[in-house]
Structures are given as structure tokens and as C-alpha cells.
Image (tube, helix red, strand yellow):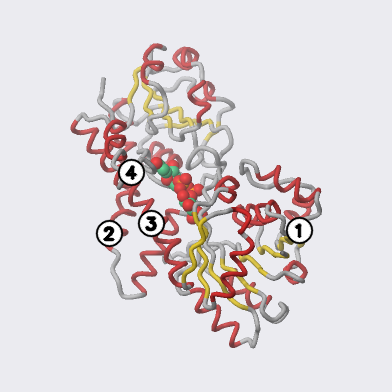
Amino acid sequence: MRAAVIGAGYVGLVQAAGLTHLGHTVTVGEVDGERVERLREGDIPIYEYGLETLVTRALGHGLLSFTDDNVEAVAGAEVVFLTLPTPQAPDGRADVSYIDQVVDELAPVVAEGTILVTKSTVPVGTAERLRRRLEELGSGARIVSNPEFLREGTAVEDFLNAERIVIGSFDRADGERVAALYRGLGSRILHTDPTSAELIKYGANAYLAARLTFANALANLAEHVGADILDVVEGIGLDRRIGPHFLRPGPGYGGSCFPKDTKALVAIAEDAGYDFELLRTVIEVNEQQPRIVVRRIDELVGGLDGSVIGMWGVAFKAGTDDTRESPALAIARLVREGGGSIRAYDPEASHPDVEMAVDPVDAVKGADLLLVATEWPEFMRVDLEQVAAVMRGSVVFDVRNLLDPEVVRAAGLRYHGWGRPRI
Ligand code: UGA
């Protein structure tokens, strides 16, 4: 089939490359002409494992093309995926103006029956609103909601091994046409109405955020009562009704999705006349997490003022160069506010607000404390003898519980995990 993707961000690029992998022909429309030039050369502007291989292969087979003209992108496409940003507006609501503009731009030019698919996360009710807009404009285009569930860093794998494809349509025949594009995946396809599909997306992210926040709260409690959170979550997760995933405690959730989507869902609920108190609390508790971490740093170094902290990781999680809403940045800010200084190393990410070191050992030179803020596996392979030799102090505070405490101690350092007994 012939498809178009509008917006060459990480969702759009993975969607486009993934569809070509399934044998479809895809044209991507992207307003940033410079980005288009780079993409045509197979130069991927984001770090996403496996994406470059798929894009290069698709370009080689002539299945993938890029243009800075959206109208040109949709010519001959049966299905058009809208993968545009929906940033957070100051009031917490998602800003859908990019989507609205593109729908207005494409409505008069697409052929009768062309399906416009909302792929990026849009407020509940958007499909219905766009359907009415198309009617107003006298366009014969159709609307389908097909939310994405891709995680940054493993987006290609998530696309190719999708656990479910959710397709929300006003007319089942439209839904079936979109489903046909994914047939090669063999994934479970769930057909719903568009509003339910939109709520599934928000519901999934909000549930995961709440579940993780629960694990973080338990870890905070474990700190006080002297339990080992790793054993606790393992013991909880062995219950099949609960399962082991998304219970790894840490400095709080971040990234471009959870913080934005949880706030947007609270606003959606508010607009609909429902107070989503549970989710409001999750957001508040998560926002406190970096403060709790910094309070602990303060204790460990005997007062933040004048302290030097070496931080491993600034990305919001491992496997990505994304620092949006990263808890590591919130921690760095709070350390500085307390009079401490911070130097960080990250294998992929950097941020102008944080002084970046060239390697993990460089980051801890003269430091009183090493904070492990992101769970990059390479940190487990750093020579801790070298770390101990260059640090001023000897405390390792591993908020992700990544390192092996025995290995840390063997290097002559003091290990502190998160929610683990203090030994
Ligand atoms: C999330 C969802 O997992 C995807 O399904 C969804 O498609 C995506 O948002 C989106 O809406 O686009 P992502 O933001 O890439 O994906 O990140 P996750 O891997 O879900 O992690 C979110 C946050 O939770 C990170 O800060 C991570 O460090 C934290 N986390 C996650 C933990 O602290 N512990 C865990 O056990 C799991």
C-alpha cells in the first residue's frame, strides 16, 4: 500500500521506516527543509536504536522518500499518518494546533476516501472534532485514531513486535484499511471507536506512571523501614495479577510523554466534569521525588553547600539522548540551589544547564559523591578503582540501583542504593 507520514519526529520516522519494512511505500512530509535534506542522505537526526538501518534499507529499495511539501507527500497515499508534535500548553492541555493546521492544509487536496490517521497523542475527542472539521470543509477524507505505544530508545523494536495495535474508527471499513497496513506484524488488533482509542493511549501512560510512582513511594518507605525494595518489588511482581514490569524505582518518571500526558489527562477529565484526583496525586508525588533524592544527597555529604557532586546520566532514562523533563536535571538544579556544584557525564545526552565531563571518571574528579541518575548499562563497566582514586569523598549514591554494591565496596567506596538497607 501507499502511505504518507506527516512529521519526521521519532514517532513519524519509526512509523515510516516500520511500514516500509512491511513492504509499503511511504513518503514523509516534514516542514524543516534541512531535516529533509539530511534524511534523504540517510542521516537520522535522533538517536533511536535500529532506525538508521531500516531507513537506509528503505531508501535503497526506493520505498521511502522525504519532502518538505505535505501536499506532495500525500499524493496517491491511501492512508496519511499524522505524527506531529502535541506540546504541552501552559495550562497543561495538549496543544493540537499543528494537527489542526495540517488537516486544514490537506483536506482540500486529498482524494475522496483518503484516511487521515491521528498517530501522535491527541486529546480525547480530537478525532470527533476533526471529523466535523472535514465535514465543514466539504472534504471526503476520513478520520481514524491509531495511537502509538512506542518507547524512546526501543521504538523500532516496539513497532516490529507490537503487543497490540489499537484502531479507533467511525466506520469499521476505514479501520480495516488501516489494519491491513499492519498485517505483516501478526500483532493483536483491537478495533474500537475513536474516543475509546484516544483514551486507551492516555489510560496506558497514566497507569504506567501511577504504577511506577507507587513503586517509588514503596522505595521511599523501604528507606525508612529498612526493607530492600528490589526484593519487595520482585515479591510483589511474582503475583501474576501484578507482573514484574515497570516497578523499578528511581528518581521519578520523566521524558516527553508521561509528564505531559498525565497532566493532559487531568485537564481532559476536568473539562469533562470529572476530578481525576488519583492522577493529580501521582503527578504531585512524582514531582516531589527529585527533592527527596536531593535531601538524601544533603545528608550523605553532610550539607549541600560547597559540595561537589559527580553525576552519571542526564538523559531521562537509558537508551536515549532525550533530556526532556529528566529527573537528573531537576536534581542538578536543586543541588545548585543548595550551594553545591555538579558535573555530569552521559554516553549520549548533554544539556546546556549542566557542566558535562568527557567520561565517567572525569565527571567525579574531586567529587564528594557520585550520583547514578540514569541506568546506562555501561556505567556498570566503569573501573571503580579509578573512580575512588579521583574522588574527594567516597560515597556512591545509586538512585537507580544499577551498580553491584559488592563491587562498589570492593573499590573502597561506600554504597547507597535507593530503598535498600543501609549497610
Ligand atoms: C512511554 C510509554 O512507555 C510508551 O508506551 C509510550 O508510547 C510513550 O511513553 C509515548 O507516549 O510516546 P517513554 O516516554 O519512551 O515511553 O519512556 P518509558 O520507558 O515508558 O519510561 C518513562 C519514565 O519512567 C522514564 O523516566 C523511566 O526512567 C521511568 N521508569 C520506567 C522507571 O523509573 N522505572 C521503571 O520501572 C520504568
Count of number-bearing discs:
4
Instruction: Looking at this view, name the residue that lies furthest to the left.
Output: 225
* Mark 1 vs mark 4: in front: 1
In the visual, does 298 lie left or right of 24?
A: left
The CA distance from mark 4 to mark 2 is 17 Å
The tag earlier along the polypeptide, 3 or 1, is 1
Q: Which mark is residue 66?
A: 1
The residue type indicated by label 2 comes to: Leu
Q: Which residue is under mark 3? A: 206
The tag earlier along the polypeptide, 2 or 3, is 3
> Which residue is pictured at 38% across the width and 68% down the height?
267
CB contact under 8 Å: marks 1 and 2: no
How crowded pointer 3 is (Cα within 10 Å; few <14, some 14-19, many 20+) is rated as: many
The residue type indicated by label 4 comes to: Gln
The tag earlier along the polypeptide, 1 or 4, is 1
The vertical placement of 184 against 412, above or below, is: below
Q: Position of residue 183 (x, y in %)?
A: 61, 58
Q: Which residue is under mark 4? A: 289
The residue type indicated by label 1 comes to: Phe
* Mark 3 vs mark 4: in front: 3
Q: Quadrant of the N terminus?
A: bottom right
Find numbered disc 3 in the image and state the secondary structure of the residue it sits on.
Answer: helix
The residue type indicated by label 3 comes to: Ala
In the visual, does 168 lie left or right of 5?
A: left
The vertical placement of 422 against 141, above or below, is: above
Task: Give residue 105's quadrant in the image.
Answer: bottom right
The tag earlier along the polypeptide, 3 or 4, is 3
Q: Which residue is under mark 2? A: 278
